[in-house]
Image: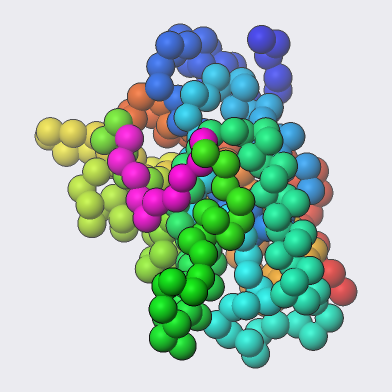
Amino acid sequence: MSFRPRINKFVYDFINYHKKSNVVGIISDTHYPFSKKGHLNWIYEIFNQFQVNRIIHIGDLVDGSAWNMHEDTRDADMVSGGKEAELAQKDIDKLFKLFPQGDLMMGNHDQLISRRMLKHSIPKKFYKTFAEAWNFPKGWSTHDYLEIDNVLYLHGTGKSGHNAAVAFMQDYRQSVVIGHTHSSGGVNYRASYKELCFALNVGCLISVQNLAFQYGKNFSKKPTLGCGIVVDGKHGFFIPMDLGKKITYSK
């Protein structure tokens, strides 16, 4: 494996030291079909460097702008619901082809359809599960949360801001990994006399050029793109995606 400048020498040496470790790679909010171009190739490269042996998508696999619960925020020039679903499925298929096995933590955007069904009292016998609707392969499954090596993985719905991951860590009193907030990415550690815990926020992988995210055009905080790595449940890393230039929105 050749050394690449995106990962510093300390991390590179750390990877080689932990070759036989349990390494979880975390994909952040993709919001298909409105994701950052080239993100899958970038993730594949990072996960190969870290020798990841388990894949977690932290939630908001799809955006669902066409069927969200806030119709007044939808831009009139956006694609139709049918077209959005078609484009999202193509992106999801690419993800599954690259990573045949993995686990999805259900995000708030992933639950938009079921929330609409619940709102209108439609019996469950009349609609598909999320996995059925998006043609999940046998190697993938959906969860509200997962615990792996004493680390809790969940989307992060219910909290926001820079310290959202820390707040979950304090609530659950264990290491946690979240996405959801978009504008933050990084890891914080907290220690007591008995244990050391971390709170990892893995950012997102959206493209702000899409009309779906024009609501944030005037926000001072911009999306932080990246992915996460957890080694043996003890070490958390946030790997930022180098965008190469200043974030700009569509005019």
Q: In the picture shown, does residue 99 fall above or below 33?
A: above
Q: Quadrant of residue 215?
A: bottom right
Q: Residue 132 location in percent, x, y?
A: 54, 56
In this rendering, the count of numbered labels is 0
Q: Would you say 15 lies left or right of 213 here?
A: left
Q: Nearer the viewer, residue 76 or 236?
A: 76
The image quadrant where one finds the C terminus is: bottom right
Q: Residue furthest right?
A: 251
Q: Would you say 44 lies left or right of 172 here?
A: right
The residue that appears at 20% across and 48% down in the rendered structure is 173
Q: Nearer the viewer, residue 98 or 178?
A: 98
Magenta span dominant secondary structure? strand
The image quadrant where one finds the N terminus is: top right
Q: Would you say 22 lies left or right of 238 here?
A: left
Q: Would you say 167 lies left or right of 142 here?
A: left
Please check the rendered image and state whether residue 66 is part of the magenta-colored stretch, yes or no. no
Please check the rendered image and state whether residue 144 is part of the magenta-colored stretch, yes or no. yes
The residue that appears at 50% across and 80% down in the rendered structure is 116
Residue 223 appears in view = no
Q: Residue furthest front?
A: 125
Q: In the picture shown, does residue 198 fall above or below 65?
A: above
The residue that appears at 72% across and 74% down in the rendered structure is 81
Q: Residue 189 location in percent, x, y?
A: 33, 40
Q: In the picture shown, does residue 24 fall above or below 28?
A: above
Q: Give the magenta-colored segment's residue range.
A: 139-148
Residue 120 appears in view = yes
Q: Residue 234 location in percent, x, y?
A: 33, 28
Q: Residue 30 location in percent, x, y?
A: 63, 53
The residue that appears at 72% across and 50% down in the rendered structure is 91
Q: How is the image coloured?
A: rainbow
